[in-house]
Each structure stands twice: as C-alpha cells, then as structure tokens.
C-alpha cells in the first residue's frame, strides 16, 4: 500500500481482534480497551483517568476493579436527562456501594444484553429508562453484592448472614474488606439466580436529593467528551453541502476551489434515500475550519426536479382541506353524531395550528466513523443503537455485530439522535464509503454546522386540529369531536409496525385518543398526508407536544364557556384518574389557586393558567403566572409544577427535568417555528430559530408527589404542559385566546 | 508561526491559517475541547473564552487577534479565584444537564463576577442572555452565580 | 380684445420657447467629442500603476461600475440590477464585451458619449439612474481606460431585462428635456486656488466616485439640488448621510484618521461601520484606492460647504443610559423599567453589542457614537436590524445576521426605539407602520 494510505490507518490491534469475531468475551476486553484508547492518549492528553483492569464483572451492568472503582455500564444515553445518575443510583443502592466510588460509562451496542425491555430494542426514548431498568439494575447490583458477600464468607470463614455491607465495605466480626480487595475472589463465585432486593424503607441512595450527578465534574471542567470532541489519529473532518430542498440531488459540482484550500484531503459525493434530503457533497480535511472553508468554496448546481417544493402556507391549506373530510377513527366512545344532533347549551368550534419544530440541541448532529474490512466502528452520542446498528450493517452488507457503536455523551438530543431512518449515521457511513473508494482510510468525523442542523429536516411534524365540543346546560362537556392532521413520524421506517395499527399512527393522536377526562361522547379522527416530504421525527414528548396544547386549550375554552373555574372544571372530569387529579390538586394548592393573584404595576395585567396531562405514565400539572404589559409583551413569572412519577429515584434530577422540560417547552411555545417557503426551510441559525434565553426563564417550583408506585420517566413529561399553561394564563389576563403556536407577538402585533 | 498564551502557558504553532477562528484553533490544534461550537455566529455563547480576562466569542474571533493576549479557557479558569468559585458552585448545585453549553456559561459567569461582585437576578439575566441552554437549566445557573458570589464575598475578597 | 391678444401673444411666446428649447435639447444630445481635451492632473490612476489594464481596473473600481452592473451571485458586469424608482423599475445593462447583449460593438466614441452625455449607442437617452450627470466630468482618457478594462473581463451573453416603467416615464426622448435642464456637460476643471490633493479628491468624489448621486438631495424631478451638495438624501430605505464639513450635522468633527479609516476599511473607531449600500461601496470600490487617494478624498470632503441638517439628528456623545451601563448590564433604573425593546435587545443583541455599546471583541459592533443611533428617524438602524450587515475587506470580515424575518414590525420598532434611547439618547418614535413601509422601500 502507498505511504499515504498507510498514514491514515489507525494503529490499534485490540479493536481488530474484536472484529475477527471473538464473541462475548471480546466485550470485556473491548470495554477496557475502549477506555484506554491509545488514539486519545496519543494526542497528548494525560490519561489521568486510567482505569484498572476489571477484576469482577458479574453481569452486563457492573464491573468492580481492584482499585475499588465501581463502573456502572449504562445502556441508556446520557443526553442531560440524568440517566447515568439514575441507573447508577439503582445499582449502587442494592450493591451498597459508596456513591463516590461509582463511575458510569456507556454500553456498547448489543441488543441481547442492553435492550430497553419496554421498547424491545436498545434505545433511549419514551421516558422509559428508569421504568425499564428499575428491577434490572437493582438486580444487577444485588447479584454483585451477593457475590462479594460470598467471597468474604469464604475468605473469613463466616456465614453470609453475619456479613454487613455498607458504602463499599464488607464487615464481619473482626474483619473488614473493601470491594476492591474482594473483587478477584468475588469473580470466582457462582452467579446467583434470585437475589432479594431491598425493602424501599431501607433505601440509602434511592430517593435522596443530596446525590450529585455522576457527570457534574467533567461537564464543568472541560473534560467531558462529546462526539464533537472525540478524536482519533489521522482523523478527517467532513463538512457537508446539502441541497436547499428535500429530495434535490447534485447536478454539476466544481470542487476545484474546495480542493485548493490547504489541509483539504478529499471531496466526495454521497447519496442516499432520494425521498429525503440525503444527497450532497462532503469536503474532508485535517481540521474543521479547513473542511468548512472547503465546503464554502464548492460550486454546486442542484437538480431539483424531484425536490419537495411546497411551503408552510400550502401545507396548512392542504391540512385544512383534509380535516374537512373523514379521517381514520382513532377513538370512538359513545356517539358524537347523536350528541351533536341533540340540543346543547354551548358549542365550541376551534382550529388549532402548530408548526414544525427543530430539536436544535446545542451540539449539532455529528458522528465519527472508522470503516474496516468487514465492518465499522462508530463513536456517537447513541440514542438508537439497535436501529442504527442494523441500518449501518445493511448499508455495509455485514453482520450487525460487526458494527460497533461506542457510546459518548450527547450535547442534547431531545429525540434527534434516535432516528428510525438513522439519517446522520448513514450519511457519515456513505461519506466514509465514498472516501474509501478514493483510497481514504482515515476515520471520518461528520460534523454538521448549525445551518445544516436547523435545515436538516426530521422535525416535530406540523399539526392541524379541528375540534368541536358541546356543553350541556350545566356547562358539562358532553361531546368532543376532534380531527388531527399530521405527518406520521414512523410510517415508511423499519419500525412502522410499532406504532401504526389499522393505518393509524398512534403517536399522532397520543394524549387525545386516550385522554383521561371523562367525556361521554368522544371521537378522534386522524388524517395522515403522504405527499408531504418534509422528514419528521419524534421530538421531546412526541405527540403530546401538540396534543396536550390542544386538549388543555380546549378544556380551558370549555371552562370559560361554562363560566366555571378552570381548575375545578378539570378536577370534576378526573374522578377516574386519581393520580392525575392528585398532581392537579397539588399544583393548585402550592400555587395558591384559591387566593387572588398578586396584581401587577399600573398598566399591567396578570393572569394564571393551568394544564394537566399524563404522558408515558407520568402525571404532571403546571400552573403558570404571567404579566402582560400594555404593549402586548409579556413575561412568564412563575410556574408551579407538580409531578407524580412513582417512586422518586433521584428527586433532584426530577426537579431539574421539570425545570428543564419547562424551559425547553417554553422556547417552543414562545418562539419555536420551522417554516418553509417553496420547499426551502426559512430558518438557519439561532437568530431565526429563536431559543429561550435566561431572561425569559420563569421561576419554577417543583413538587414531587410522594409515591411507592413503580418509577416512570421525567425526561419528556414536563414539556407538553407549559404551552397550554401559558396560553391559558394569557387568556386569564387578557381575554384573548391563542390557538396557534408559537405565541410570538400574537398579543402585540 | 504564531505564539499564543493559553491558560498561562505559551505555545508556538506552525502553519496556522491566521483567519481560522480561535474556537477551531483551540479545539483542533491546541486540543482544548472545552469551548464548544454551537452556532458559529456568536449567537449562542457556547464558544466563550476569555481574552485578557474579557469574555469573547471565539467562533468569530480570528486566531490572529489573540496573539499577544492571554487566552483562558474552561480548562484553565479554575486557576483564578472567581473561576474556581464558579466551578464549585456549578458542582454544588448540579447545574449541568447535557453539559454542552456549560463551559461557555462558566466563562461568561466568571467574567461577570469579576466586574460585578453581587449581581441581582436582573443583572445576571442581562449579562448571561447571550449564553443559550437548550436543556433549560437557567434557574440553576442563576442560583450558582449567586452561590459563587456569596462564597467569594464570604472569603472577604475585596 | 385685450385678453384675446394677450392669450395669443403668450401662446406664441410659449410655443416659440418650447421650439427653441426642443431644438436646443435635440442639438445638444450626443455632444461628447473633445478628442483633444487634455488629461487633467487630478485625473487618471495613480502613477505607481503602470500596466494600462490595471490602470483601467483601478478607475473602474473608483467609479464602482461593478456595483450597479452585477447582480449578486451572477457574472461580473453582466447587468440586471434592479433600480426601483418612484416611477417604476429599470434594470442595468450588460457592460461586458458581448457583441449582441453587451457593449462589444461599441466604439470608443460611443462609450465616451454614454458617460459624458447619457446617450446610448443608438442615440437613445439613458436613464439617470446611470450617473452620467457625474461621469460627464471624467476625462476621455480615463473613460477609455475603463472601456479597455471592461473589454478584458470575461464576456457574458446576458440579454437586458426589460424596464418596467409606466407612461410617460417609458418615453426615453423625454429625457432630452431632463438633460437639457439638469445635465451640465462639463469636463472636470481643476480649481487653481486649491491644492493638488484637493483637486484629486474632487475628481475622485464628484467624477469617479459620484458621491453626489447618493449624498446630495434631489428635487421633485429627481435632479440633484445644486447648492446642497452632499447634504444627505434617503434612497431605497437607507439614509446617505450629510457628509459636508458641518461640524454638527456632517463629518466636520471627525478626525482625519477616522475619515480615512471609514473610507478605506469601512470602519472608524468611535464612529461606526459602513453598512448597506455604503458598505458595498467600501467593499467594491473604496478599499482598493491607494492611501494617497483616500487622503485626497479626505482633503476634499473637509472643504465641502457645510450644510445644516435636521435638528434632532445631532450626535449625543454622552448618552446617559449607555454611560450608566457596564459591558454586561444596563443601569439598575433601566433594568427596573424593562420594556419590550430592552427585552429584545437583551436576548438578540447584547451578546455582541454589549450594553455599553462598545462591541464585544470587535469594534465593528460598537454602537456608541454612530450616526445610526443618532438619527432620530432611525433609517439605517432599521435597515441594519432588518437586513443585517456584512463587510469584507482586507482587514477582515464583520458580520451581523438579519432579524427582519423573525421579528414583527412592532418588535423591530420597539427595539429600534430602545437602541435610539439607550445609545443615542434620542426619543425614538418608530411605529410598526414605519417598519412595514421600510421593509419594502
């Protein structure tokens, strides 16, 4: 091979052996090798966190080293939601470890060992991490503890019953040993099948607010490693040119100026699914700036003959039209036709509109690929291991096990990195394949700019709702007819059958079709367009992000029409949903709903609004207080949030997720919109896709319902409530009802 | 050939494109990946570092403009009393979620506390509005800045 | 009858005058031949440039042909730029040497006549969006150097876009009357009493750079107001400021350094950054002038008769709110009053511009001391908020994103009023309607 080709090979024998198929054992070796990455060390960074070889590894989730380090292997992605901390808490609790001796690392892709038991594949999503891991991680810790105890019993010749374990130490009369000291011996013990778990009243870590997050140190000293940071020797950075319109492909490319930029190594064209926006050109260079400069110097003519060319206005017009015709029935209770035909005291007819939303995590999409003969390695903030592994394996025509995915932190995701279409990964692999054909064997890091990320599609779909509600003489809701129009986020992907039954994508109607309110006659229909080729994806809280806004807005409209207090009105319809009623009452009580709202300054109007909603088995209520100025500008002053997520594993993480979810949801409520004109996405960066900034963040008081129920998730569940709570508060303050998001300047325009 | 002082040490670099933004220089050439790329247009603050103690957006600052000045990144900010107090407060209150924006937040907060020993909530908002956090951990950022301010004043720092 | 005779006499006089005038107008069309006129000392390219095509390029840059004859992203000099006037839209022509769609078939005399007399190859009058009223002062030698340069650039086949003018403005012959009234076909004459630098500056400003065409107010017939040179004018939503030597309303209190920095680099410390159309002038034209030529321009500008401006637009160099602010925060009083404008500035602007207006890390972002925040009508401030600003010279690049699409008229008005108050010490009166009009000037 030529000198230049040899130059770009990675030198790391341990990984090559992995791909030669050493099976499960390789995982253990591999896990150690990944951490002592020679490539990383070769960049001059002192490996101050060198980990001693694993001495004791009783199961897929924990390793204990002779230096007393307990490593918890997290099958879930840490993208800010605190999952590393939560999973470590569960395991460390039953292990009786000292919190400070525990560290966490991400699991490799291995669906047999690391699948999400609620989703059936290895993935992080649906706020299921704690729910699906609660017993699994506890058992893993309990098993390890039992084996340590058995080792001590053997060593000290005492009965297992006489041994106490506390904060990383084992004790018996006259004896004492640390986990590290007993690790090697514990490894020789048989793995027990059934180990009893603790009684929750004995919990020392679970339920404690004082536990610090496991990632609080490296994320504050600059050493936390995101995909954006990870490097391998001879790595090339790929910055891509995408077409403006989804479905366009390159027609003519002049890369002369791009190639002339110093440090540019190659320019390649990649193609993919022409249905979306997959085709483009990548400039590969030895550093990011050179790659970007090269990309900016490309001269490309695009063939847009097959490109999607509609704009937001046309899409909305089409959706309105579709809502006027029959859709597929997602829910039918009672007889809405008869109910509407009968006499009713009040009728509410409303249309609600929600725009496309970008995820816009702070870390734009990226991933690092190293192709090899027979497989590849990927470094990524992996949110969808099984799907990605399979998709890449299919593209490379190799067995799935030959696609190794190394888990890193993700700088936010909000669902973007869990794409059933595996888009950005397949793009990176396509680029690597095209480069391979040109003799480029280096590891390649695909890095999207913020513009590519904002315009790259895979948005929360735009939603159009048409609803009709009927109230009786007492103001009670007696009939609710609802038509939802939205693209399906799962149709056409390998995971269609998960959510689509009888042609209905359940994700588009969740929160509506299964609403908790007792409405005797309820009919929810869904129309799903198949000609709108804007790529769409699950966005934090998925269908709830749209449907809670609409349902909580409509219930509020009904309460107002009935002349009833919006809190009592909801409460009266939740007799069959005690946990939902519980959070509603808690929020209202803590917010002082019964007392008058403190008035604002002269010329200011104040208002408060409520929303309550269940998503992913977690119950949340939020009460927002706003101040509206005479020029129509407003501020959300305070949000009181009550949450029932079953047993609270890490109360401080729950509080943080409620606060953060509100911040994230508020950004969308106030500003968030992706709009298209003639098929071109109009927003490109944060000056037009406007984020929430600190000056807009309200004070958030969080109250957790004490519960012994099974734990459920909090990663997404605060998000859907804030938009309706704020809109209801604005109605309370001004009498103006907002049925379209984002709120933006609707009050001041 | 350029010389840069980064976190108190002077480094020499060959063959550097002087128009390369300081951010990419720090990340790709100097191997300090604490400062992050979030937007490339000085709209999000993730790239914030200090130049002679002033908070700057390194994504739009050509590396040539940093020659002859002192660059401080999050990796070195703890060498300073204020930076150390800020980092400790960030850890005490578990401010971080995904953590990607936090180096920039810490650098901006440190610069603020250097000039404003006891900022009000409104002053914090005014000073920190340029640093975006998509995870929404703003409440804790405010609280941590107050915490750091209290720590510093308790130490009797004049 | 006395009245009848009076009417007859008056009519006859009127008709005679009209006939005479028409004759004069028609006779003076196409007057461009002075093949023996000497090259003024103030004319030409700098002596340090010896290559004739490079000399032509220098002069073409000084005359800024490229700006009006090139649509952004299209081939240079291929025409098609739209000029939206009160009376319709006209498009600039292709001035590459294409024989069919450009000036490839034009003789030297044809080209000189176009610049001196505003007449095309076939004798048709040209619309004065083409600044022949200034170019008429150019020497023949300079015009031909420019022509030679234009003939050396890549030929582009680009047919002219049809003008969209309503009657009577689409009647070209009417321009003969306009020219008769307003076109003074004089070549540049050096002022004997002035220095060589002054004369060079005058040639650069009035003939080549045609500063008057933007900076001098126009009358109702769209002609430059004689006697009010460089007193300022509003066009296409931007205000071309008063750049006379007036100390309060013009550039009289600028230092020489500030003037030459602004002209040569597009930015002057304490004075601001060239944006919009003037930013393009710096990028396309002024940044290529030699230091001597910039100095000559400064010499000339310092001597332009001072013209008073509108009261209320004076620079306030001690705006109280900006002075009460630190880089990080506004004054406590202002924070307590936080209105929509402040909140918008806080989120979208303070990060780069800083509360004290000094600009974070880049002087180009400094707001304090700029004309934009002093103009109480906030024309340029509005446009910069709506469109953003970009300047690329040899000294680097300055870039500000546009905010027009993401923010409503009411929001932009509130923000503009905040900026005027905080940095200019002025009471802003922008309304949403003002912004709506300025979005599509």
Image (cartoon, coloured by chain):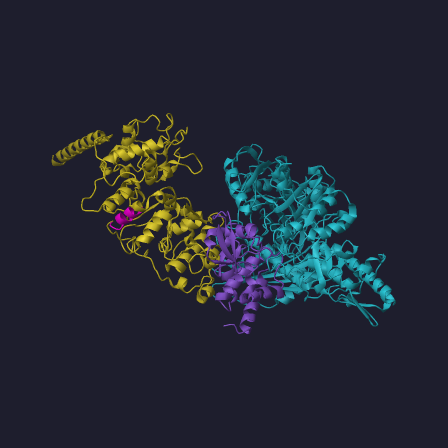
Task: Tell me what hue chain C is rendered in.
Answer: yellow
Whether A718 is among the magenta residues is no
Residue A490 visible? The answer is yes
Residue range of the region highlighted in magenta in the rendering:
C294-303
Q: Look at the magenta stretch and give its main secondary structure.
A: helix
Q: Nearer the viewer, residue C192 or A351?
A: C192
Give the side of residue A279 with respect to residue C267, left or right: right
Which chain is drawn using cyan?
A: A
Whether C295 is among the magenta residues is yes
Task: Tell me what hue chain B is rendered in.
Answer: purple
Image-quadrant location for residue A5: top right
Residue B25 in percent (x, y) is at: 53, 51
Residue A623 in percent (x, y) is at: 61, 61
Residue A230 in percent (x, y) is at: 62, 50
Q: Is residue C33 above or below residue C434?
A: above
Give the side of residue C336 with respect to residue C255, left or right: right
Image-quadrant location for residue A166: bottom right
């Amino acid at each position: 091979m030529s000198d230049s080709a040899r130059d770009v090979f990675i030198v790391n024998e341990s990984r090559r052996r992995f791909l030669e198929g050493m099976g499960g054992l390789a995982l253990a070796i591999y896990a150690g090798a990944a951490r002592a990455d020679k490539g990383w060390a070769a960049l001059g960074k002192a490996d101050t966190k060198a980990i001693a070889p694993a001495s004791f590894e009783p199961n897929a989730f924990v390793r204990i080293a002779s230096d007393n380090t307990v490593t918890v292997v997290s099958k879930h992605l840490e993208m800010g939601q605190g999952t590393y901390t939560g999973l470590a808490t569960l395991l460390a609790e039953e292990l009786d470890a000292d919190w400070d001796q525990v560290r966490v690392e991400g699991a490799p892709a291995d669906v047999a060992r690391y699948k999400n038991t609620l989703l059936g594949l290895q993935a992080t999503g649906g706020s299921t991490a704690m729910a699906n891991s609660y017993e699994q991680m506890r058992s893993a810790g309990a098993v390890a503890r039992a084996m340590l105890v058995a080792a001590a019993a053997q060593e000290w010749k005492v009965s297992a019953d006489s041994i106490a374990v506390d904060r990383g130490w084992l004790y018996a009369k006259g004896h004492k040993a640390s986990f590290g000291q007993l690790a090697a011996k514990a490894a020789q013990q048989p793995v027990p099948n059934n180990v009893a778990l603790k009684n929750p009243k004995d919990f020392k870590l679970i339920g404690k607010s004082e536990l610090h997050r496991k990632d609080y140190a490296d994320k504050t000293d600059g050493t936390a490693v995101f995909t954006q940071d990870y490097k391998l020797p001879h790595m090339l950075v790929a910055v891509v040119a995408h077409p403006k319109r989804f479905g366009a492909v390159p027609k003519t490319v002049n890369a002369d100026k791009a190639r002339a930029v110093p440090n540019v190594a190659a320019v390649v064209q990649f193609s993919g699914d022409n249905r979306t926006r997959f085709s483009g050109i990548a400039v590969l260079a030895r550093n990011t700036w050179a790659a970007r400069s090269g990309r900016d110097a490309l001269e490309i003519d695009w063939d847009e003959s097959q490109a999607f060319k509609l704009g937001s206005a046309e899409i909305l017009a089409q959706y309105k039209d579709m809502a006027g015709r029959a859709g597929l029935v997602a829910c039918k209770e009672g007889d809405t036709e008869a109910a509407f035909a009968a006499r009713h005291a009040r009728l509410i007819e409303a249309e609600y509109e929600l725009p496309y939303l970008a995820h816009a995590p702070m870390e734009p999409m990226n991933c690092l690929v190293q192709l090899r003969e027979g497989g590849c390695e990927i470094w990524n903030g992996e949110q969808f291991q099984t799907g990605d592994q399979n998709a890449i394996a299919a593209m490379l025509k190799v067995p799935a096990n030959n696609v190794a995915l190394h888990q890193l932190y993700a700088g936010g995701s909000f669902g973007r990195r869990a794409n059933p279409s595996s888009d950005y990964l397949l793009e990176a692999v396509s680029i690597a394949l095209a480069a391979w054909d040109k003799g480029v064997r280096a590891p390649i890091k695909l890095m999207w700019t913020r513009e590519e990320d904002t315009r790259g599609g895979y948005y929360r779909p735009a939603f159009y709702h048409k609803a009709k509600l009927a109230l009786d003489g007492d103001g009670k809701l007696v009939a609710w007819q609802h038509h939802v129009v939205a693209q399906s986020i799962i149709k056409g992907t390998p995971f269609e059958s998960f959510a689509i039954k009888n042609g209905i994508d359940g994700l588009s109607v969740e929160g509506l079709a299964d609403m908790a309110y007792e409405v005797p006659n309820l009919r929810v229909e869904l129309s799903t367009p198949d000609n709108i080729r804007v790529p769409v994806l699950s966005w934090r809280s998925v269908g709830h992000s749209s449907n809670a806004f609409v349902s909580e807005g409509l219930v509020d409209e009904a309460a107002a029409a009935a002349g009833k207090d919006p809190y009592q009105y909801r409460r009266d319809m939740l007799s069959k949903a005690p946990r939902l009623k519980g959070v509603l009452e808690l929020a209202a009580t803590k917010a002082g709903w019964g007392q008058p709202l403190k008035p604002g300054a002269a010329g200011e109007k104040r208002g408060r609004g409520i929303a309550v909603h269940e998503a992913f088995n977690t119950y949340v209520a939020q009460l927002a207080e706003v101040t509206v100025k005479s020029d129509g500008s407003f501020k959300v002053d305070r949000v009181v949030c009550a949450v029932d997520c079953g047993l609270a594993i890490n109360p401080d993480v729950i509080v943080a997720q409620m606060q953060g979810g509100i911040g994230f949801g508020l950004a969308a409520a106030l500003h968030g919109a992706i709009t298209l004109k003639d098929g071109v996405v109009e927003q490109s960066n944060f000056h037009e896709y406007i984020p929430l900034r600190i000056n807009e963040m309200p004070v958030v008081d969080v109250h957790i319902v004490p519960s012994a129920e099974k734990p459920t998730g909090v990663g997404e569940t605060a998000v859907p409530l804030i938009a309706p709570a704020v809109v209801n508060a604005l109605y309370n303050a001004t009498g103006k009802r907002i049925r379209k998001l984002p709120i933006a300047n609707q009050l001041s325009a | 050939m350029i010389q840069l002082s980064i976190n108190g040490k002077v480094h020499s670099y060959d063959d550097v494109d002087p128009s390369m933004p300081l951010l990419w220089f720090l990340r790709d050439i100097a191997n300090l990946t604490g400062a992050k790329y979030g937007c490339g247009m000085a709209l999000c603050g993730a790239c914030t570092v200090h130049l002679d103690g002033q908070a700057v957006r390194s994504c739009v600052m050509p590396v040539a403009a940093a020659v002859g000045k002192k660059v401080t990144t999050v990796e070195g900010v703890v060498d300073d009393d204020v930076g150390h107090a800020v980092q400790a407060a960030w850890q005490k209150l578990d401010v971080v979620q995904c953590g990607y924006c936090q180096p920039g937040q810490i650098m901006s907060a440190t610069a603020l506390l250097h000039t404003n020993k006891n900022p009000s909530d409104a002053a914090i908002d005014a000073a920190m509005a340029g640093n975006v956090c998509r995870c929404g951990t703003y409440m804790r950022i405010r609280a941590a800045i107050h915490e750091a301010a209290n720590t510093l004043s308790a130490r009797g720092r004049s | 009858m006395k009245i009848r005779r009076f009417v007859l006499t008056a009519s006859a006089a009127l008709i005679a005058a009209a006939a005479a005038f028409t004759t004069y107008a028609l006779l003076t069309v196409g007057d461009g031949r002075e093949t023996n006129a000497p090259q003024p000392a103030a004319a030409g390219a700098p002596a340090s440039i010896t290559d004739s095509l490079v000399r032509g390029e220098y002069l073409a840059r000084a005359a800024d042909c490229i700006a009006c004859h090139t649509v952004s992203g299209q081939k240079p000099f291929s025409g098609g730029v739209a000029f939206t006037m009160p009376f319709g839209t006209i498009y600039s022509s292709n001035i590459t040497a294409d024989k069919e769609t450009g000036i490839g078939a034009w003789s030297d005399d044809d080209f000189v006549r176009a610049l001196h007399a505003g007449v095309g190859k076939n004798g048709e009058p040209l619309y004065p969006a083409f600044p022949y009223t200034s170019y008429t002062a150019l020497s023949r030698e300079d015009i031909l150097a420019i022509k030679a340069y234009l003939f050396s650039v890549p030929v582009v086949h680009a047919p002219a876009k049809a003008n969209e003018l309503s009657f009577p403005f689409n009647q070209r012959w009417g321009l003969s009357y306009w020219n008769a009234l307003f076109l003074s076909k004089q070549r540049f004459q050096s002022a004997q009493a002035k220095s060589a630098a002054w004369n060079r500056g005058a040639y650069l400003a009035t003939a080549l750079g045609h500063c008057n065409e933007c900076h001098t107010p126009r009358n109702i017939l769209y002609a430059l107001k004689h006697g009010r040179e460089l007193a300022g004018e509003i066009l296409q939503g931007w205000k071309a400021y008063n750049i006379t030597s007036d100390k309060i309303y013009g550039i009289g209190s600028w230092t020489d350094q500030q003037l030459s920095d602004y002209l040569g680099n597009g930015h002057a410390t304490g004075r601001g950054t060239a944006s919009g159309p003037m930013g393009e002038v710096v990028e396309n034209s002024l940044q290529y002038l030699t230091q001597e030529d910039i100095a000559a321009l400064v010499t000339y500008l310092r001597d332009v008769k001072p013209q008073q401006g509108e009261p209320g637009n004076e620079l306030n160099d001690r705006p109280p709110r900006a002075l009460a602010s630190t880089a990080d925060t506004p004054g406590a009083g202002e924070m307590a009053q936080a209105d929509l404008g402040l909140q918008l500035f806080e989120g979208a602007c303070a990060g780069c511009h800083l509360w004290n207006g000094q600009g974070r890390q880049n002087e180009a972002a400094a707001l304090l001391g700029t004309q934009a925040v002093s103009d109480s009508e906030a024309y340029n401030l509005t446009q910069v908020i709506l469109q953003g600003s970009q300047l690329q010279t040899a000294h680097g690049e300055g870039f500000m994103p546009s905010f027009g699409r993401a923010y409503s008229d009411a929001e932009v008005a509130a923000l503009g009023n905040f900026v005027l108050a905080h940095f200019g010490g002025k009471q802003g009166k922008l309304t949403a309607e003002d912004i709506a009009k300025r979005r599509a000037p």
